[in-house]
Image (spheres, grey):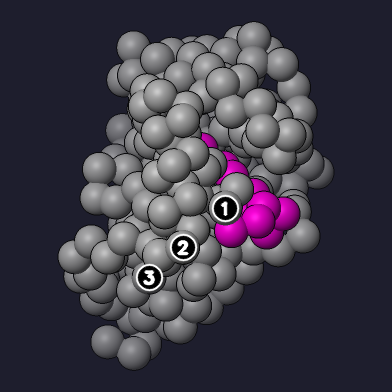
Amino acid sequence: MLALSDLLELAERYNRELPAAPAALKPPQGAGIAAWIDHTLLKPEATAPQVKKLCQEAVEHTFASVCVNPANVLLSAESLSGSEVKVCSVVGFPFGATPATVKVFETLACIDAGATEIDMVINLGALKGQAYGQVYNEILALAQVCHNRNALLKVILEMAILTRQEKIIGCLISKAAGADFVKTSTGYGPGGATVEDVDIMYRVVGPQVKVKAAGGIRNLQTALAMVSAGASRLGASAGVQIVQEAVAQS
């Protein structure tokens, strides 16, 4: 990790002027957008038939993954057996306010049940309270668990509740701790993904770390705007509609 003083100095510099954006991503064409989407069902009341339907849709359209709550990982993995669609699950969701040891246990349980991608919510109070070492250690612990088990780690920063400087610091800490992605939102916070936030994230972490935009992405126009800003993965419960719209316009 960068020394904390160096990280904060870099954050101050980026807060004054962001670095140049990495190379623009090539937008997907037609049905190809499905490979950019985590087909998502995180409602706490989701039933087994709804999870199975999600998985059937994911196979039909070849989404990147299904994103489900931990209790639905095993069913999703069984439903997707033999397909290329991955299982993504959430940890510390939706508030992030659980101990790091619990998040590690939850991560291992999800991976054991069949998840190969983990979207974890950081300890937002620690970030806003400037307990940056605590934030770093938590992300590092989960990154090590994921990478030791051949899984990806996406770090949810819940950008809508952070100041510009906190967004930058959160991205820098996530990058230093070994995250594979930074992610905009849980979908349960005060706001979802914005083009401005995706641009900030892409400029701060790219191209070594990827950006996932999630929350409020309900149509093709919004999806492509997020890609143009630097998102290489999209979390959406409206994935089928987005793909259908893309095919209709291709």
Residue under the point 46% across and 30% down: 5
Residue at the disc numbered 3: 229
Q: In whole angstroms, how far apart are the C-alphas of marks 1 and 3?
A: 19 Å
- Residue depicted at x 57% and y 53%: 165
Specify few, some or many for label 3: CA neighbours under 10 Å numbering under 14, 14-19, or 20 or more. Answer: many
Which residue position is annotated with label 1?
Answer: 165
Asked whether residue 160 is drawn in magenta, I would say yes
Q: Are marks 1 and 2 in contact (CB under 8 Å)?
A: no
Tag 3 secondary structure: helix
Q: Earlier in the sequence, mark 3 or mark 2?
A: 2
Toward the bottom, the furthest residue is 249
Is residue 7 inside the magenta stretch? no
Q: What distance separates the C-alpha of mark 1 from that of mark 2?
A: 9 Å
Q: Which residue is mark 2?
A: 16
Counting from the top left corner in percent of width and height, residue 168 is at 50, 50
Gap between marks 3 and 2 measured at Cα: 20 Å
Secondary structure under badge 1? helix
Magenta part of the chain: 153-164
Q: Position of residue 6 (x, y in %)?
A: 40, 33
Image coordinates for residue 18, horizontal then vertical, percent = 38, 62
Q: Residues within 10 Å of mark 2 (few under 14, many from 20)?
A: few
Which of the labelled discs sits on residue 110, or is there none?
Answer: none
Q: Residue at x 34, y 19 (%)?
A: 147
Cβ–Cβ below 8 Å for labels 1 and 3?
no
Q: Image height check: is 90 above or below 114?
A: below
Please indicate whether residue 145 sits to the left or right of residue 97 in the image. left
